[in-house]
Amino acid sequence: MKILVTGGLGYIGSHTVVELLNDNYEVIVIDNLSNSKESVKDNIEKITNKEFELVIGDVCNKDIVEDIFKNNKIDAVIHFAGYKAVGESVAKPLMYYHNNLFSTINLLEVMEKYECRRIVFSSSATVYGKPESLPIKEDFKLSTTNPYGTTKLMIEDILRDLYVSNNDWSIAILRYFNPVGAHKSGLIGEDPNGIPNNLMPYIVKVANKELECLSIFGDDYDTKDGTGVRDYIHVVDLSLGHIKAIEYVLKNKGVDEYNLGTGKGYSVLEMVKTFEKVNNVNVNKKIVERRPGDIDACYADSRKAKEILGFEAKKGIEEMCLDSYNYVKKNL
Ligand code: NAD
Ligand code: UFG
C-alpha cells in the first residue's frame, strides 16, 4: 500500500511516517519545508532503517501534486500540510486561508481525478470553540474563535460535502487535542521557530535556559488549581492513531470525525511539576494575566476512536515530559 503524506516532515507528520514505514507501508512525502527541515528525512530513515520518497514542493501547486499521482498508484493520503499558529492566523488571515484551503482543494481535486478517494485529515479540537460541557464528544456544536480554527472547520465541511457528492469517498477527520512529546530516539521532535506559543515547547526552553521564565496564563480558571486544563497526547500515540485511521479508510467508505486525545485533563501546574520531577530540573515560572481567547478546560471523550478505529492512547504525562526534554537536549 502506498500512502502520500503531505507535510510529512513536520512534527506530527514525521512521527507518522516512522510508524507507516515500521508497518511496511510505502510512503511518499510532499513538504515545502515552510516549517520543517530536509534533514528530518535522514532522521526518519535512521530510525526506521527504511527509505521513502520526498518531493520538496507546495501542495498549493497543482502540477506538482498531479505529477505525484500520475507517476504513482497512491492508495490513500494523510493530509498534514498547513499552517497551525493561532496568533499568527489572527495577524495574517489571508495567508492561513490561502495555504490551508488552496492546498486542500488542490489535493482533493487531484485525488478525485485519479480516483484515489481515501483521506485522513488533521483537524483540531479547536473546532469545538468553547465547549458547553466536558468531556468533548464528536457531535458537540462546532464553532471557531480564530482564522486557523475556521480553516479547519471549513475543510471539515468541504470533506463532508465531498462525501455527499460521491459515496465512494472514505474520509477520517481526526481532531487532535494537545500533541506533545517526541520519538524516544531524540532524532525527531517539535522544533518551533522563535518563541514558542505552546506550553510544552516553552517549558522545555525554560528548563534548557534558552528562555528565562514560563508565564502561566492565569490561575483563576474554574479548574482544580485555577490553571488551564488540557488533554495532552504523546505524539507517538497520535501517530499510531493515524495508522488505525488509515487501516480504517482502506477498508470502509464514509466520512466521520474522531477525537484523538487521552480523555484525561491536566492543568498547567500539573504539567510543570511533572516535568520538573521526571527530568530533575527547575522551571522558573510566574503567574501572569490570562491569555485572551483561552478556555478553562478542554479534554476529549475518546471512546469513539477506541470503538470504531481501535485506537487508545497509552502514554502518560511523565513519558511526554521526559521525551520532550530528551529531544531538545539531544539537539542543542
Ligand atoms: P508542522 O508545522 O510541524 O507540520 C506541517 C508541515 O507541513 C511542515 O513540515 C510544513 O513545512 C508543511 N507545509 C505547510 N504548508 C505546506 C504546503 N502548502 N505544501 C507543502 N507542505 C506544507 O505542524 P504539525 O504540528 O505537525 O501539525 C500537522 C497538522 O496537524 C497541521 O495541519 C495542524 O494544523 C494539525 N494540528 C496540529 C496540532 C498541534 O498542536 N501540533 C493540533 C491540532 C491540529
Ligand atoms: N500556557 C501557559 N503558558 C504558556 C503557554 C501556554 O500558561 O506559555 C497554558 C495555556 O493558557 C493553556 C495551556 O497552557 O491553558 C495549553 O496551551 P497551549 O498553547 O499549549 O495549547 P492550547 O490548548 O491553547 O492550543 C492548542 C493548539 C491549538 C489548538 C488547540 C485545541 O495550539 O492549535 O490546542 O486543540 F487549536
Image: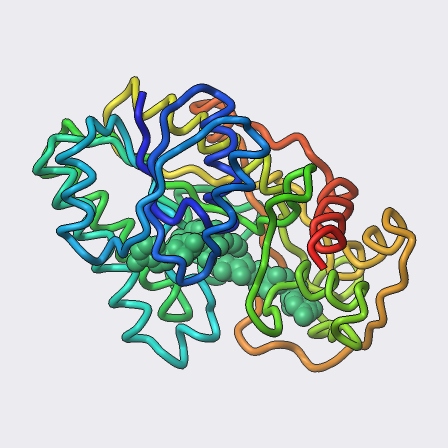
Q: Which corner quadrant holds the C terminus?
A: bottom right
Q: Which residue shows up at 24% across the image and 52% down it?
A: 104
Residue 271: image x %, image y %? Answer: 77, 55
Residue 32: image x %, image y %? Answer: 34, 57
Q: Give the quarter the ligand 2 occupies.
A: bottom right
Q: Quadrant of residue 25?
A: top left
Is any part of residue 194 visible from this angle? yes
Q: Which residue shows up at 64% across the image and 54% down it?
A: 230
Residue 319: image x %, image y %? Answer: 75, 40
Answer above or below: position of 184 versus 30.
above
Is any part of residue 125 visible from this angle? no
- In front: 9, or 313? 9
Answer above or below: position of 76 versus 267.
above
Relative side of 219 to 153, left or right: right
Q: Which residue shows up at 73% across the image and 57% down it?
A: 267
Answer above or below: position of 57 versus 169.
below
